[in-house]
Image (cartoon, rainbow, N blue to C red):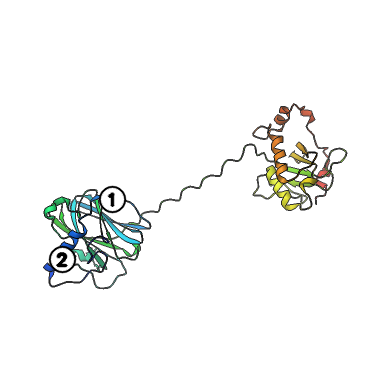
Amino acid sequence: MSRFGKGGPPAHANGKAKGHNTAEEERAEEQQAQQDNGAAEADTAPATDATSGGERIFSYEEDGLAYTVRVFEEDGVVRAEVTVDQGSMDVNAVYFTSDDYSGPSANLGGPLNMNGGGSRFEGDRVSWEDAVAVSHPGLGPQGEDKPSFLSEGDSLTVDLSAASVEDVDLIGIRATSVNGGDSIKGVSGNPEEPEPEPEPEPEPDPDPDPDAATYPKVYFATGLNDDDSPAAGGAGILGPDEENEFGTPQLGPDTDGTFADYVEFLGEEFDDIAPGDIVTIIFYEDIETFTEAFRINAPEEGFTSAADMLAAYDDAVSGMSADGDYIAYFATQDIDEDAVPEDTGSDELDEISVM
């Protein structure tokens, strides 16, 4: 890819184009010398796509020649990449302007001027804001190896003095040796602004842990009655989806109802109940009939922390099936199904005071 601008003609690549000069022949010779010096080490290559900001695309097609000009920002510099899509041409100058520009029209003069057809677009007069000299017309001894000569698929890039991509609304190309001999003063407007790349779809939340069973109610008992029902003073907590007629402490709607949710809620809402106060944790599978799923009794030394309770729970349910099949759990423990503790059926459970 040939790049002109920073390494191109010092007189016009990065500065405002000068007005008409009466000594046009002398000016043209100076431009040719400057361009030959700036393009000596440039190569022609397929277009690249390295941008760091927005971009605009300008198109031109006429008499077997088609090219695209991509205006983009890279490293804080607005650049124009000219790519031939069909035919061939020797690019001699690149002009640009914005819709808001109303000053005198820049003109490189001599054979690089945009007089006549290069000064109008869709019937309206164009006032060019600036221009970049690329090469003097004529292939010379280099022939089609001249850096500014582009065949199908070739491109070159020049630096523009525009403040931003949005300040480039019209692009003008002065080119000769078009498809073997013609010349153009092509003006392109109505730029396309490529649609931004769609935002990648957010990664879905990982599937819930199949072993993370949920419960409609968990009771952290600090004491037991003679019939093994929880004594007053513990903490009965409802799951997030349960009807709550008696103002029982309940998990928030954004929780799932896992045991970890219950333990966290206990620590946040029951300041007067420490892990060491809990003697039994009762898990219910049906709160309408007060049917217990299972219990976890505290070790002799008691629970020392929330993590200790979670670890005891993990040990207890390690034999359960993935969907929380409690009967399967007890079967693996060689415990008779009839031995699964059941609630007495008394409605007094929901009336137990919670602190």
Nearer the camera: disc 2 or disc 1: 2
Please give the residue where the numbered disc 1 appears in the rendered image: 47
Q: Is residue 4 visible?
A: yes
Q: Amino acid at mark 1?
A: Ala
Q: Residue at x 72, y 42 (%)?
A: 308
Rounded to the nearest angstrom, the CA distance separating label 2 from label 1 is 29 Å
Q: Residue at x 20, y 72 (%)?
A: 19
**Can you tell which mark lies on residue 117?**
none
Q: Quadrant of residue 231?
A: top right
Residue 178 placement, left or right of 325: left
Q: Is residue 201 above or below residue 187?
A: above
> Dots 2 and 1: beta carbons under 8 Å?
no
Please give the residue where the numbered disc 2 appears in the rendered image: 30
Q: Residues within 10 Å of mark 2 (few under 14, many from 20)?
A: some
Q: Is residue 4 above or below residue 232?
A: below
Secondary structure of residue under mark 1: loop
Q: Is residue 185 visible?
A: no
> What is the number of callouts on the image?
2
Q: Residue at x 77, y 40 (%)?
A: 282
Q: Position of residue 82 (x, y in %)?
A: 25, 55
Q: Is residue 168 above or below residue 181?
A: below
Tell me which label, 2 or 1, sits earlier in the chain: 2
- Out of 64 and 105, give the one closest to the viewer: 105
Q: Quadrant of residue 95?
A: bottom left
Secondary structure of residue under mark 2: helix
- Out of 74 and 10, give the one closest to the viewer: 10
- Out of 49 and 59, give the one closest to the viewer: 49
Q: Position of residue 17 (x, y in %)?
A: 23, 68
Q: Residues within 10 Å of mark 1 (few under 14, many from 20)?
A: some
Q: Residue at x 12, y 55 (%)?
A: 140
Residue 312 placement, left or right of 32: right
Q: Position of residue 138 (x, y in %)?
A: 13, 57
